[in-house]
């Protein structure tokens, strides 16, 4: 972004209303029925890994990350990643992803999961999870259930049901 000054910072409690409106616009009223959303209901997102994008004082993007249990292993569930439509394709989604993944790596996490478009998320290293290896609490297109290993071999050690991990 050249003409506007973009800043990425940790999500603040005061961001939540704007983020809720962003989610409403991007995903509509059906968003709470989505499998990933159901998983997130069980635990609040992690403030230390969730980031907000601002242009001036305008909130234009958000990424949230939630702690989950993946079989016997701890993991992270990334999402939603949302960018205000008028600000798409300016690198904001990518900046949010990189900031969040760097923070997760720095904090020693080993595995990040998400449900989303592989053609977008592959640029950050996400790959489809072999069907049946991990099971979400609801239906999901296997081609959209993706993982990024922050530590080599982390996915092999996480097998079975994915569940919310209350703090
Ligand atoms: C997906 C989303 C977060 C991308 O944010 P963004 O700020 O526009 O992304 P960036 O600017 O970092 O990247 C833009 C690039 O990604 C590509 N891209 C965007 N969405 C894509 C998708 N669903 N599949 C494949 N490529 C996609 C663009 O074509 C562009 O490609 P280019 O770099 O070759 O020009 C944003 O479009 C959005 O909020 N969409 C609605 C909500 C959503 O679907 N969220 C993801 C599921 S949780």
Image (cartoon, rainbow, N blue to C red):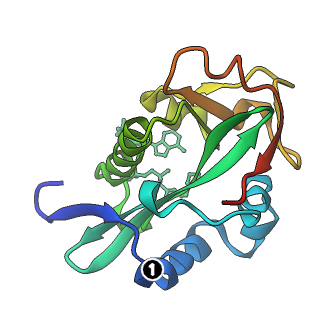
- Quick one: which residue is furthest to the left in this view? 3
Task: Name the quarter where the C terminus is drawn.
Answer: bottom right
Residue at x-position 43% and y-position 58%: 48
Identify which residue, 60 or 147, lies in the foreground: 147
Q: Which element carries disc 1, helix, strand or loop? A: helix
Identify which residue, 106 or 84, lies in the foreground: 106
Q: Residues within 10 Å of mark 1 (few under 14, many from 20)?
A: few
Q: How many marks?
A: 1
Q: Quadrant of residue 60?
A: bottom left
* Residue 112 higher or lower than 82, as above or below: above
27 relative position to 60: left or right: right
* Residue 38 higher or lower than 131, as above or below: below
Where is residue 79 drawn, in percent x and y? 58, 53
Residue at x-position 67% and y-position 38%: 74
Where is residue 23 drawn, in percent x and y? 57, 71
Task: Name the quarter where the N terminus is drawn.
Answer: bottom left
* Residue 154 higher or lower than 55, as above or below: above
Residue under numbered circle 1 = 13
* Residue 4 higher or lower than 116, as above or below: below
Where is residue 113 drawn, in percent x and y? 63, 38
156 relative position to 91: left or right: right
Q: Is mark 1 within 8 Å of ligand 1?
A: no
Residue at x-position 44% and y-position 42%: 104
Where is residue 27 drawn, in percent x and y? 64, 66
């Amino acid at each position: 972004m050249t003409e506007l000054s973009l800043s990425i910072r940790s999500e603040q409690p005061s961001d939540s209303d704007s983020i809720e409106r962003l989610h409403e616009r991007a995903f509509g009223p059906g968003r709470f029925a989505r499998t990933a959303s159901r998983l997130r209901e069980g635990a609040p997102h992690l403030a230390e890994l969730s980031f907000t994008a601002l242009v001036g004082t305008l909130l234009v993007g958000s990424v949230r990350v939630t702690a989950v249990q993946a079989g016997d292993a701890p993991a992270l569930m990334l999402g939603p990643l949302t960018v205000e439509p008028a600000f798409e394709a300016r690198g904001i989604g990518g900046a949010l992803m990189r900031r969040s993944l760097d923070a997760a790596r720095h904090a020693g996490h080993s595995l990040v999961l998400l449900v989303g478009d592989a053609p977008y998320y592959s640029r950050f290293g996400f790959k489809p999870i072999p069907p049946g290896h991990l099971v979400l609490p609801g239906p999901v297109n296997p081609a959209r259930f993706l993982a990024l290993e922050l530590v080599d071999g982390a996915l092999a050690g996480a097998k079975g049901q994915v569940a919310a991990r209350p703090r």
